[in-house]
């Protein structure tokens, strides 16, 4: 039995993505201990930093909220170490996204982006699990559509869901469990991977700070090394 940890990211009204981190027992243990250790490294260098602070990728990258007192060099170090932990954990990452302008051009009344991307991510995770011959439960970051998401997931397990999925879910079991990411290192790892892989699709946008480019490239390449699917729809 594995666990699929899911979280969202977006860029303005142009791109919306759901990332899913598929982890077995060893990967769960590796990521939990690794992120705890990285938190301790930052706390050792920054007075007053709580080592249990959430690894929220946006805050880490921009130095906001709990990360505002952490020097940029240390934030880069923590981010690269987090990407290495994900890449070396044995977990597999999946990204499903929506090109919002193309979606709105194609459909007059498209499904809400969270609903559609989440269903596509679950379908892709289910296909991946089928290839592994494994089953999994789903843990997702808290969201205001949680109850609708559970109902939709139940319908996807019963049959294909027109407009959302092309196959019946067979390897994701039980229900979708929603919880706060600040209490879960694994949801934080999913958030981290989703945020940086989302940045990979921000074309033709380029990183304004030239100093940040090699570090972001390194982080993205590490996440890419354990990515099984990375697909934004509709494509050109």
Image (spheres, helix red, strand yellow):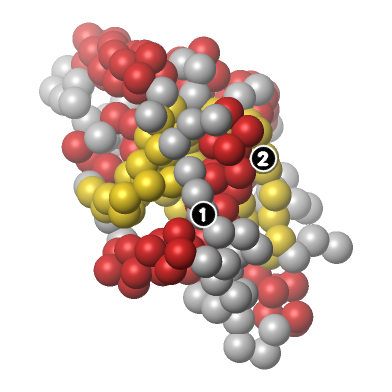
Determine contact: label 1, label 2, CB under 8 Å: no
Please name the residue shown 27% across and 43% down the image. Answer: 181
Q: Position of residue 96 (x, y in %)?
A: 61, 52
Dot label at residue 229: 2
Q: Which mark is residue 25?
A: none
Q: Nearer the viewer, residue 61 or 90?
A: 90
Mark 1 or mark 2, which has the lower sequence index? 1
User: Which residue is farthest bottom?
Assistant: 108
Name the residue carrying label 1.
Answer: 169
Residue 233: percent from left, percent from top: 71, 61
Disc 1/disc 2 C-alpha distance (Å): 17 Å
Quarter holding residue 212: top right
| Circle 2 SS class | strand
Confirm whether residue 11 shows in the render: no
Identify which residue is drawn at 75% across, 81% down. Answer: 105
Please tell me which residue lies in front, 44 or 36.
36
Depth check, front residue: 76 or 181 = 181
Q: Residue at x 54, y 43 (%)?
A: 125
Q: Which residue reaches farthest right?
A: 236
Instruction: State the SS at label 1.
Output: loop
Give the side of residue 175 with respect to residue 215, left or right: left
**Residue 114 rendering spot, x and y as whole percentages:** 47, 66
- Estimate how packed mark 2 is, as few (under 14), some (14 to 19) or many (20 or more) residues with alpha carbons within 10 Å: some
Q: Nearer the viewer, residue 38 or 8?
A: 8
* Image spot of residue 3 (x, y percent): 38, 34
């Amino acid at each position: 039995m594995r666990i699929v940890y899911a979280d969202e990211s977006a860029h303005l009204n142009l791109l919306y993505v759901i990332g899913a981190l598929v982890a077995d027992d060893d990967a769960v243990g590796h990521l939990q201990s690794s992120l705890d250790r990285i938190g301790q490294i930052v706390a050792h260098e920054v007075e007053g930093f709580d080592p249990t602070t959430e690894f929220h990728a946006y805050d880490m990258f921009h130095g906001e909220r709990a990360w505002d007192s952490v020097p940029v060099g240390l934030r880069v170090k923590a981010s690269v170490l987090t990407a290495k932990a994900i890449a070396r954990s044995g977990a597999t990452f999946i990204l499903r996204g929506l090109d919002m302008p193309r979606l709105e051009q194609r459909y007059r009344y498209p499904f809400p982006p969270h609903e559609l991307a989440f269903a596509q991510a679950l379908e892709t995770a289910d296909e991946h699990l089928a290839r592994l011959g494994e089953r999994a439960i789903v843990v997702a970051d808290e969201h205001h559509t949680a109850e609708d998401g559970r109902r939709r997931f139940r319908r996807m397990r019963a049959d294909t869901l027109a407009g959302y999925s092309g196959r019946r879910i067979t390897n994701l079991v039980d229900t979708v469990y929603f919880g706060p990411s600040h209490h879960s290192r694994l949801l934080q790892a999913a958030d981290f991977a989703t945020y940086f892989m989302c940045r990979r699709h921000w074309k033709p946008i380029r990183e304004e700070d030239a100093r940040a480019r090699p570090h972001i490239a390194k982080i993205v390449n590490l996440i890419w090394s354990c990515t099984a699917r990375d697909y934004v729809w509709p494509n050109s």
